[in-house]
Amino acid sequence: MKDLLTVLKDWEAVIGLEVHTELTTLNTKMFCSCPIEFGAEPNTHVCPVCLGLPGALPVPNRAAIESIVLAGLATNCEIEKRSMFYRKNYFYPDMSKNFQTTQGPVAFCMRGWLDLEVNGAAARERVVRAGTLPLLAEDGTGTASDVTGAATATPAPPIAQLDGYVTHIGITRIHMEEDAGKTVHYGGTDGRITGATYSLLDYNRCGTPLIELVTEPDLRTPEEARLFLQQLRQIYLTLGISDCSMEEGSLRCDGNVSLRRRGEVEFGTKTELKNMNSFKNLHDGLAYEICRQAEVLESGGTVRQETRHWEPAAKRTVTMRVKETADDYRLFPEPDLAPYDLTDEFIESVRARLPELPDAKRQRYTRDYGLPRADAANLAGDASLSAFFDATLQSSPQVARLAPRIANLLLNEVSAWLNAHNTVIENSKLTPQHLAQLAELLAGDSISSKQAKEVLAQSAETGASPQQIVEQSGIKQVSDAGELEAIVAQILAANPDKVAEYRSGKTGLIGFFVGQAMKATQGQGNPKLINEMFTQKLEV
Ligand SMILES: [Zn+2]
């Protein structure tokens, strides 16, 4: 099979996503008062409504409607004031009602969009032919055009930037539905039904409110799909409507993918991909499927419309079932639930609750604090780190000039420490004031970046201030030029052979010299200063 980049030279991939998100932060289910709890004893959170027993009547969960309206507003959707629920009929053991309550042609949220910024290595999958995506000059002049240069179904062509591009992804709709229960198969391999000797049913998840977001087929590469899902996850996390755990299945993504020859306008036959339960699997599953379809088409075959299962271990997709059509489900209006009439007051009260979204935050960080674009994006995408960053900047008016350094500390040293201790910043003893102090110490060359790591670790563990730690433990950085000059001179005098080698071209020896000086200062010398001194002395 050809690799992805080779395939994408001849073929354009057309990808759409369906993203299911459980509203895990709600207390109760969609139409009853059973609690939502992951990992509870099987069949302990059930009642006549979510089991669909005779005579039980559903009562809608207002908080769930608020959550989906929040999601719609955050993704630029139009909120439909009048919509209703339908019954989607099918038999499956994990759904004892024999129908799923879902929405019909009109969902709560319709016609939204997100702009996707694709930078660096991720842009490579789209920019496959040199010159087909002209980059903007630094002053913003220059033309932007579609990658293919031909008419496509994408409404707006991507806008090229210096090191990547921005592409506009349409969102068809976000509708509300309820989740089914869980079937667990025993006796087979990998928990699948094949070869199983028996299966058990857990109805706890039945009736958990789900929102399903469907994109337009506007995505063109597996990287764009991955980035879209990451951006959406950040938005949902910021809204606080779900814990968005791909491992626990509260965020699930299916992909539709088809190919067409570059320059063609007609869509090819699509397949639907399932079981892509991580960002990497989403990318790799789509990449595999694109290459598989290219091979089928190039050998004169036709792609069959079907649902395929991604097998991460085997790195391939396999046929799961040939697709049912919507008609097979006999979708009809739910007689037990009246149509919704959302009022302007309701919609506006939800809009007033919208927090600052990652995209706006990212722009604020580059505009107000001059953060590098990648740092701004990474920080804005992490709700808890960005809240800490904002709190640090608010701790004193003097720290604004240190903002890039504070961002850098949070994204590197602080994140590394949190990962190593398997915790989150809220549970550490680090305070915004202490982080600002650490940045001050670094900026004033009082401590080295290596020492900063030590000080940070102590502060995060004990809650002591960096200033205090530095004073008590004698950590300091020697930046005294006279003291360092003497050490540098000694080392040069003691290593005449190395000096000669350096001067004959082995400039990599600078590391050796700096290392010796760091040793001589017990790690407290200012490495930047030492480096400069050696370079100056050696290059005469
Ligand atoms: Zn219930």
Image (cartoon, helix red, strand yellow):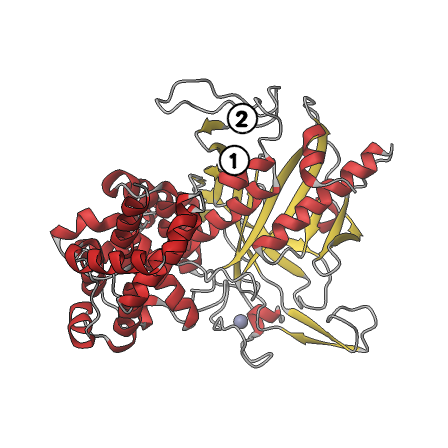
Seen from the viewer's position, the closer of residues 302 and 107 is 302
Residue at 69%, 49% in the rendered image: 273
Q: Amino acid at mark 1?
A: Gly
Name which residue lies at 74% across and 32% down.
Answer: 268
Q: Nearer the viewer, residue 195 or 61?
A: 195
Across and down, in percent, residue 508 comes to 43, 49
Q: Residue furthest left?
A: 397
Ligand 1 neighbours mark 1 (CB distance < 8 Å): no
* Residue 78 visible from this viewpoint: yes
Image quadrant occupied by the C terminus: top left
Q: Is residue 523 visible?
A: no
Residues at marks 1 and 2 touching, judged by CB atoms closer than 8 Å: yes
Image location (x, y in percent) of residue 233 = 47, 53
Place residue 363 in its image quadrant: top left
Image side of residue 406 versus residue 67, left or right: left
For numbered disc 2, what is the local secondary structure? loop
Please give the residue where the numbered disc 2 appears in the rendered image.
155
Which residue is more in the foreground, 57 or 405?
A: 405
The residue drawn where x is 57% and y is 53% is 279
Instruction: Tell whether circle 2 marks a residue whose Cβ is less than 8 angstroms from ligand 1.
Output: no
Residue type for callout 2: Pro
Element type at mark 1: strand
Vertical relation: 430 (above or below) 355: below
Residue for badge 1? 170
Real-space CA distance between mark 1 and mark 2, rounded to the nearest whole angstrom: 8 Å
Disc marking residue 289: none
**Residue 377 relative to residue 2: left or right:** left
Circle 2 crowding by C-alpha within 10 Å: few under 14, some 14–19, many from 20: few
Q: Quadrant of the N terminus?
A: top right
